[in-house]
Structures are given as structure tokens and as C-alpha cells.
Amino acid sequence: MKHCVFYDPTTGQIRSSSTDDIACWFIDTDYNGESVFVRHAYFTGGDEPYEKLKRALRAEIDEGAWSTLYSTVSRPFAPPETEKIAVKVINLYGDEVLKVFTLG
């Protein structure tokens, strides 16, 4: 189990949590350095995220499609033209972290 560290600006405290606490994460596979364009989205939170998403959307969701989104490993993607990707992680507490990676 891996751990993540989050800073809570409302309390000034640093909180450690495991990857089990990640609710969702997103990848911009061709980050332009200004804004994140979500090209991949994954939902990994516990406590029945599939059921919660169905209720929130008020719609049925194809279970096969859902299984591709419920993952801690991304689908493959082509190398970005910008040579940068951005990964945004949101934990179950609503904390957000953005990390930019330069490839190549």
C-alpha cells in the first residue's frame, strides 16, 4: 500500500493517507502548461462508487465501460506533443493534488 501526503489549508496540517483514500484521478495526456484537459478519468474510491455514480447521474451505466474506469493503472496513450502530462488526484476528503511530468 502506497501513501500520499496532503496539505490541508483550512487547518494548516499535513495529512498522510494511503492510495485506498483516492476517490478519483485524471490525466491530461498532452498538458499545455495552463489548464488541465481531462483525457482519462478513473474512479477508485471505496464504498460503492459505481452505485454512487449511477445515483448521481440518475442513469444506468454499462458495467463493462465502468470496469475500464475503475482502475489505479491508466490505459496506454501516445507520447504527448507537449512532452508533458498532468495527473490530478482527488482523495475521499476532497483534497486535490496536481503533478506535472515532463517526458522525453
Image (cartoon, grey):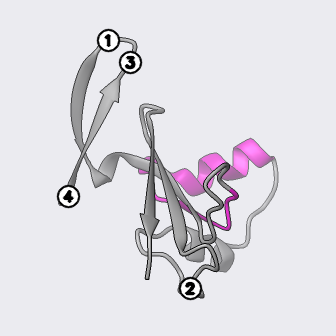
Magenta segment: does it hold 81? no
Q: Residue at x 38, y 18 (%)?
A: 9
Q: Amino acid at mark 2?
A: Pro
**Residue 60 horizontal/vertical position (percent):** 78, 61
Q: Secondary structure at mark 1?
A: loop
Q: Quadrant of residue 102?
A: bottom left
Q: Earlier in the sequence, mark 2 or mark 4?
A: 4
Point out which mark residue 2 bears: 4
> Are the residues at dot 2 and dot 4 in contact (C-beta closer than 8 Å)?
no
Task: Classify the position of the C terminus by image quarter.
Answer: bottom left
Point out which mark residue 9 bears: 3
Residue under numbered circle 2: 79
Left or right, 36 with reference to 67? right
Q: Secondary structure at mark 2?
A: loop
Q: Disc 1 and disc 4: Cα gap in Å? A: 24 Å
> Are the residues at dot 3 and dot 2 in contact (C-beta closer than 8 Å)?
no
Examine the rendered structure and indicate whether residue 36 appears above or below residue 68: above
**Residue 37 horizontal/vertical position (percent):** 70, 58
> Are the residues at dot 1 and dot 2 in contact (C-beta closer than 8 Å)?
no
Residue under numbered circle 1: 11
> Are the residues at dot 1 and dot 4 in contact (C-beta closer than 8 Å)?
no
Q: Disc 2 and disc 4: Cα gap in Å? A: 26 Å
Q: Disc 3 and disc 2: Cα gap in Å? A: 35 Å
> Are the residues at dot 1 and dot 3 in contact (C-beta closer than 8 Å)?
yes
Q: Amino acid at mark 3?
A: Pro
